[in-house]
């Protein structure tokens, strides 16, 4: 096979594998959470991904069409082996075209990106028109990244969990993000994008799950030797099951003690934990 043929074959293979990966399915039947949104935030970001991919494919296809057209039109042939192209300095029409097209693509990408980003800054408000529906006010959960574990505090419920968080399905959740160690990034791919946990800062991220289920989360920011263990689970329950879980945890879980809090503050990994209070006793 000629070198040009090998290069084209490799290029087609890379493009084909990339498109297969973007379908969200692997050989083992697993799915890519980012491409399988399970909530309104993730769904909005998913549409941005698809729109960005569509624009990218327009550019790629345009380049390929021009590339193969030029290969065919100006290929070497016996009748033109002595052809010498004329000297050309500039072409106002074509220079305008290849300047305007990127501007249009950037605008087409920027407008929906800015719109979605601003719409996702805060959870939707429950107004009078939605009163009496199943839509509920957001609940607040504080997320603290320790080294190397995740601590979740429920101010309204006076509960604390470690390395897992329980949320009501169909209800927005306001996550208040901070850190007591190095900077981390809180990320639940199936529910939405990520946000940083920074010492001395109180950053916000709201997410919502459409239905009950279990979703994997992790740190998306390298923070030291225990970074690979900084994973957690989001357990989405129906509102009734969430209320029952709160009551059961208050009755069965031990209160947070100073010793337990000191253990959480030490660098290292721990298993899932739950406490019936937020403040150490």
Image (spheres, rainbow, N blue to C red):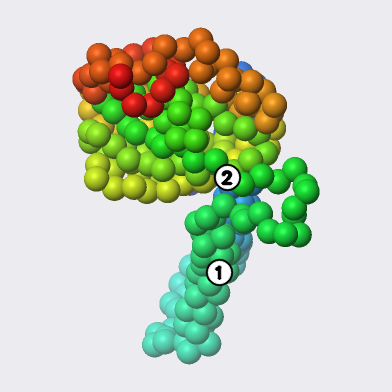
As displayed, is residue 269 above or below residue 59? above
Spatial separation of the CA atoms under disc 1 and disc 2 = 28 Å
Numbered label tally: 2
Nearer-the-camera pick, 4 or 103: 103
Residue 152 in the image: state x and y as whole percent.
42, 29
Nearer-the-camera pick, 53 or 4: 53
Write down the residue under mark 2. 138
As displayed, is residue 141 above or below residue 88? above
Q: Which mark is residue 72?
A: none
Find numbered disc 1 in the image and state the secondary structure of the residue it sits on.
helix
Residue at 52% x, 79% y is: 100
Find numbered disc 2 in the image and state the secondary structure of the residue it sits on.
loop
Tell whether label 2 touches label 1 (CB within 8 Å).
Answer: no
As displayed, is residue 224 above or below residue 34? above
Q: Does residue 236 appear anywhere in the picture? A: yes
**Residue sitting at the far front:** 281
Residue at 49% x, 35% y is: 156
Nearer-the-camera pick, 184 or 99: 184
Residue 132 in the image: state x and y as whole percent.
78, 48
As displayed, is residue 47 above or below residue 227? below
- Report which quarter residue 9 is drawn in: top right
Write down the residue under mark 1. 111
Residue at 68% x, 31% y is: 239
Horizontally, is 37 left or right of 109 in the view?
Answer: right
Residue 50 in the image: state x and y as whole percent.
62, 51
Residue at 42% x, 87% y is: 90
Horizontally, is 267 left or right of 13 in the view?
Answer: left
Q: Nearer the viewer, mark 1 or mark 2?
A: 2
Disc 1: CA contacts within 10 A as few (<14), some (14-19) or many (>=20) = few
């Amino acid at each position: 096979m000629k070198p040009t043929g090998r290069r084209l074959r490799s290029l087609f293979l890379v493009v084909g594998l990339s498109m297969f990966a973007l379908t969200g399915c692997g050989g083992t039947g697993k799915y890519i959470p980012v491409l399988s949104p399970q909530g309104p935030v993730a769904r909005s970001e998913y549409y941005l991904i698809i729109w960005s991919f569509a624009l990218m494919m327009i550019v790629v296809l345009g380049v390929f069409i021009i590339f193969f057209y030029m290969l065919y039109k100006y290929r070497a042939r016996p009748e033109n082996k002595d052809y010498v192209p004329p000297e050309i300095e500039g072409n106002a029409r074509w220079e305008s075209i290849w300047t305007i097209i990127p501007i249009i693509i950037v605008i087409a990408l920027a407008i929906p990106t800015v719109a979605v980003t601003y719409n996702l800054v805060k959870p939707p408000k429950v107004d009078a028109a939605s009163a009496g529906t199943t839509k509920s006010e957001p609940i607040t959960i504080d997320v603290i990244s320790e080294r190397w574990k995740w601590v979740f505090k429920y101010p309204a419920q006076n509960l604390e969990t470690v390395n897992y968080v329980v949320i009501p399905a169909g209800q927005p959740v306001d996550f208040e993000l901070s850190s007591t160690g190095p900077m981390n990034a809180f990320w639940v791919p199936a529910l939405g994008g990520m946000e940083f946990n920074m010492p001395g800062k109180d950053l916000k991220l709201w997410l919502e799950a459409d239905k009950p289920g279990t979703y994997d989360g992790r740190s998306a920011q390298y923070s030291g030797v225990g970074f690979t263990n900084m994973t957690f689970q989001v357990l989405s329950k129906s509102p009734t099951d969430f209320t029952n879980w709160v009551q059961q945890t208050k009755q069965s879980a031990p209160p947070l003690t100073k010793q337990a809090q000191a253990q959480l503050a030490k660098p290292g990994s721990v298993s899932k934990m739950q406490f019936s209070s937020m403040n150490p006793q």
